[in-house]
Amino acid sequence: MSFPAPFQSPLEPTAAATREAELTALVAQLVATDHQVQRGAVSTTLSAEEIRARIAALDLERGAELGSVLPELLALLAAGQVHTPHPRNFGLFIPTPTFAGQAADLITAMMNPQLAIWSLSPAPIELEQRALRFVGECIGGGADWQGQFTSGGAEANATGLLLALTRKFPDYGNRGTRALTGDPVFYTSAECHLAWLKIAHLTGIGRAALRLVPVDESLRMDVAALRAMIADDKRTGCRPFLIAATAGTTAAGAIDPLEELAAVAREENLHLHVDAAWAGALVLSRAHRAWLRGLELADSITIDAHKWLSLPMGAGMVFARDRAAVEEAFRVSTSYMPTTLDGTVNPYVLSMQWSRRFIGLKLLLTLANVGRVGYERQFAHDIALGTFLRARLRADGWEILNDTPLPVVCFAATERADEFAFHQCIADAIVGSGVAWISTVKLRGQIPGLRACITSYRCQAGDVEALIAALAAARAIAVRN
Ligand SMILES: *Cc1c(COP(=O)(O)O)cnc(C)c1O
């Protein structure tokens, strides 16, 4: 038997001092890139061909010194994406990540703890638990919320649906949908996040299990319509099991009537999940918590940490009231995982993921840095800017289409109110100019408009004014064409 010679691993090609120098240089380049990005265009200026040509130049066969690869890579990224850290990213809710959150992800990448099981990562898991308990106490409602970090809102919602199936159909865990007599059905508003369709697909209940309940004039789930649909479904032998309310719809910020929905869920013995992916951050805000009244009555809740809590992706959270259901849904035992210690939390048997990244550090570190009070001040500022944006749009002759106190505004040009292409043309002009990033929207599945959302903590009144000016210019051109 030959003894393998000492080996200089190619995976760790440099000495510690050199690594420190490279990391320091990288941080300097990142900070410079961030400054440049904030002053430049919000969105990409490169074509697919240009991007692919620059990527093709990388030598994946033999590799190269990191120091020679990184500058070009950062330049490509600076030119080849919509910049979520830009103050004029009025986009889908991916905010500028907090500085503490960025630091946390760097720590996580370098220390790489395995959070599947407590005995492997006692300190990381206790840090996550502290953050989850903190948010759970803000949710309130007298529950001992069982929280877990997820990859994002979609996984958190999928967890909610799985808990609902597990609670309402005791044999579901073993026999799946074969255990059911009658088709399982669940209810969301027609304005819900359509990840529910994918979730229904993957759990095996099928996309047809999703019932889209009509909305009222404020785009909130119509409770009378919901009651009628449940009654109809029961009459035809279906098996309602879940109401999935939304607190802050993605498109328009509508908050379903949570207290009334909780009453329906209680009467009909249905699981109530509340998808509060982005607006759920307001549980931390004493001034705005009342906007989410009834959230605390839910059986399970989604709050995305990478939405309004402004953490780097991916970071979601799911909270469940019924710990036994969580344990039932994710139970498993193996010969090779260390045994469970009493009084400790083992995320691999309490959530979907197995090997688990240290997702929660970015929330804990941001809270430990800016505190709940820092978040409260930020939310108040964002909401004030949203109100300012709404007022400025109205003053500039736009019609406001949505009714929400949240900082998301859907609006339309009255002269061409029913033309989606007209609004698309304006959005394309804004995005193409690089001045700001906004999107189009279709409310009630048909009413066309534009959508602007305050997402960056860097956004100031001047950025809103820049958007207003760009909109007026794009509208004037679109009218002439
Ligand atoms: C963003 C969003 C989701 C999906 O969350 P991801 O983090 O993108 O997986 C679900 N529901 C609502 C209301 C959202 O805004």
Image: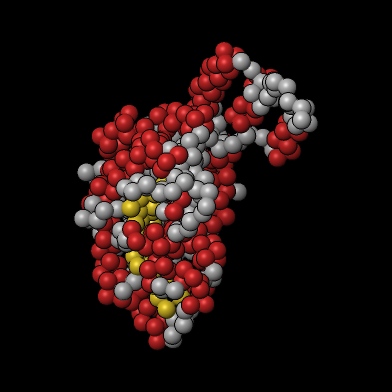
Relative to 119, say whether 98 is above or below: above
Relative to 224, say whether 309 is above or below: above
Q: Residue at x 37, y 78 (%)?
A: 230
Q: Position of residue 60 (x, y in %)?
A: 75, 32
Q: Nearer the viewer, residue 273 or 49?
A: 273
Q: Is residue 467 left or right of residue 295?
A: right
Picture quarter with the N terminus: top right
- List the single residue furthest toward the front: 1
- List the single residue furthest toward the right: 61
Relative to 271, say whether 284 is above or below: above
Q: Residue at x 52, y 77 (%)?
A: 178
Q: Position of residue 94 (x, y in %)?
A: 46, 42
Q: Residue at x 37, y 47 (%)?
A: 341
Instruction: Tell me if I can see residue 190 in this picture.
Output: yes
Colour mode of the rendering:
secondary structure
Q: Position of residue 358 (x, y in %)?
A: 45, 38
Place residue 327 in its image quadrant: bottom left
